[in-house]
Image: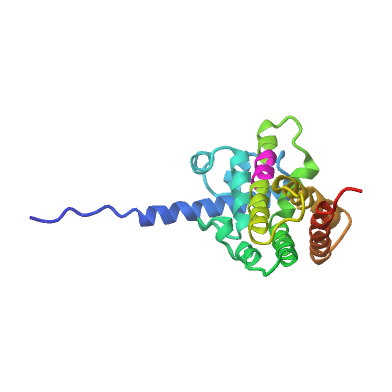
Amino acid sequence: MSTPRRYDNTRRAEAARRTRGQILEAAREQFLDTGYHSTTVAALARAAQVSPQTIYNAFGGKAEVLKALYDVLLAGDDEPIPMRERPEIIRVTAQPDRSATLRAYAAAARTFIERTGPLIWMVLAEGAGQDAELRAFLETIDRERRIGNTGVVEHIANRFGLGDGVTVERAVDLVWTLTSPENADRLVRRCGWTPADYERWLAEGLVTGLRILSRPAA
């Protein structure tokens, strides 16, 4: 009696992955060339050489494509590896003291901004307006960034301490504010700072800011 053949969906999964990559590359070009609001799913489909329904099936609507593109740019690839397990964050958590950890985090933030900056700055320049889905996207990435900030601050608190009277929440407020894409947008895109300038500013801001928080009130 012959053994039933097991269905292998490897080829189908790889084809779907290639299609997603094709759509995301087309979306990156469309968003940066014509803006988010002016880009339509139909235009994305034409640029990616797929049907609009393929985009809906793979991602959902235009805002979901934007979020998927942002996630891939942030990570640097489409591998399902959590950010905490990626080299940039592993490098942060391997530092020998609090200041070195914050400076390594500033370097990671520079890398993330270099990857995602043009996309986010385009969205910030256009503004969400009455687009509820775009507002939801901005709120989501802000919330996700705070989660990442919290992980780094908790690492510092557990390993080195934050300083007298400094709570994790207050330190996260500081890190979340300084690493905001709005700051990078102002300094790099609008003021013409280099990414290296931005990294130095952020590193000093994080180290000095946490030191100030730990000082007793006058």
* Residue 161, quarter of picture: bottom right
* Residue 139, quarter of picture: top right
Is residue 204 visible in this depiction of the protein? yes
**Protein image colouring:** rainbow
In front of the other: 98 or 33:
98
Q: Is residue 44 above or below residue 21?
A: above
Q: Is residue 168 magenta?
A: no
Q: Is residue 61 above or below residue 71?
A: above
Is residue 41 visible in this depiction of the protein? no
| Position of residue 202 measured from the top left corner of the image (x, y, whole percent) | 80, 59
Quadrant placement of the N terminus = bottom left
| Position of residue 85 measured from the top left corner of the image (x, y, whole percent) | 55, 60
| Position of residue 88 measured from the top left corner of the image (x, y, whole percent) | 63, 64
Q: Is residue 58 left or right of residue 113?
A: left
In front of the other: 43 or 126:
126
Main SS of the magenta part reads: helix
Q: Which stretch did the figure color magenta? A: 138-144
* Residue 21, quarter of picture: bottom right
Residue drawn at (68%, 54%) of the image: 153
Residue drawn at (36%, 56%) of the image: 10
For the view shown, which residue lies furthest in the right direction?
218
In front of the other: 142 or 207:
207
Q: Is residue 83 left or right of residue 218?
A: left
Q: Is residue 125 left or right of residue 53?
A: right
Residue drawn at (50%, 42%) of the image: 54
Residue drawn at (80%, 44%) of the image: 125
| Position of residue 193 measured from the top left corner of the image (x, y, whole percent) | 86, 61
